[in-house]
Image (cartoon, rainbow, N blue to C red):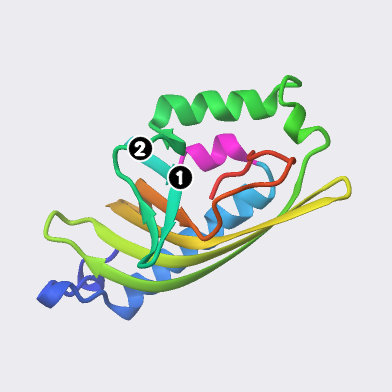
């Protein structure tokens, strides 16, 4: 990442940095769609916090409780274990492998005082397996750590728009 790619005034992110982050997300999508999860894990920071909380619908919209059990509440070791399971024949929910299509719309990027970048995006994910289809929509809030030549994902919070899933189970990364 070039040093002049980040304007520190009011957290505004330059166009050059935006293009670099978009390239990072394109790489991530290609890895996930290609089921190349080991390579996807290489995009993670060692201190990754990957969270997909269970939400509650209220009159004010969806609420995700910080202290409640989530669909995913992972660190790097738990993500590695989940990947190992998906790669094994023990993962019945992914036999045969799902066909996945990710559509990510980057909405906002803000340079943080600690040097990280906060990225928010909309998520649309289609999953097809056997005769079962399911789709996921929601928002992703990421923290990206700049490193030489790219970024590492330090945290991801995914708030899904729906609260219940089909009989297919939850076997995808967001």
| Magenta-tinted stretch | 36-43
From the viewer's side, name the closer residue of 51 and 21: 51
Mark number for residue 68?
2
Figure quadrant of residue 142: bottom left
Query: Can residue 20 be seen in this snapshot?
Result: yes
- In the picture shown, does residue 115 fall above or below 152? below
Q: Splitting the image into 4 quarters, where does residue 94 fall?
A: top right
State the image coordinates of residue 93 (x, y, percent, origin top left): 74, 33
Q: Callout 1 environment at 10 Å: few (<14), some (14 to 19), or many (20+)?
A: many
Q: Secondary structure at mark 1?
A: loop
Relative height, residue 139 to residue 81 (above, below):
below
Q: Is residue 36 left or right of residue 111?
A: right
Q: Is residue 124 above or below residue 56?
A: below
x and y, in percent, of residue 174 in the image: 53, 50
Residue bearing mark 1: 54
| Residue ID at (17%, 61%) | 112
In the depicted structure, whether residue 100 falls above or below residue 80: below
Residue 77: which quarter of the image? top left
């Amino acid at each position: 990442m070039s040093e002049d790619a980040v304007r520190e005034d009011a957290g505004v992110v330059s166009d050059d940095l935006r293009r670099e982050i978009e390239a990072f997300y394109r790489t991530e999508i290609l890895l996930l769609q290609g089921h190349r999860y080991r390579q996807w894990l290489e995009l993670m920071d060692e201190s990754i916090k990957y969270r997909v909380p269970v939400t509650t619908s209220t009159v004010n919209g969806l609420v995700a409780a910080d202290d409640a059990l989530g669909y995913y509440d992972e660190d790097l070791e738990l993500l590695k274990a989940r990947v190992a399971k998906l790669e094994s024949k023990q993962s019945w929910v992914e036999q045969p492998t799902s066909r996945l299509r990710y559509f990510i719309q980057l909405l906002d990027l803000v340079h943080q005082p600690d040097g990280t970048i906060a990225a928010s995006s909309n998520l649309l994910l289609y999953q097809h397996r056997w005769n079962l289809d399911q789709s996921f929509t929601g928002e992703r809030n990421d923290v990206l750590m700049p490193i030489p030549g790219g970024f590492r994902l330090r945290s991801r919070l995914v708030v899904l728009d729906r609260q219940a899933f089909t009989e297919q189970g939850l076997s995808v990364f967001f």
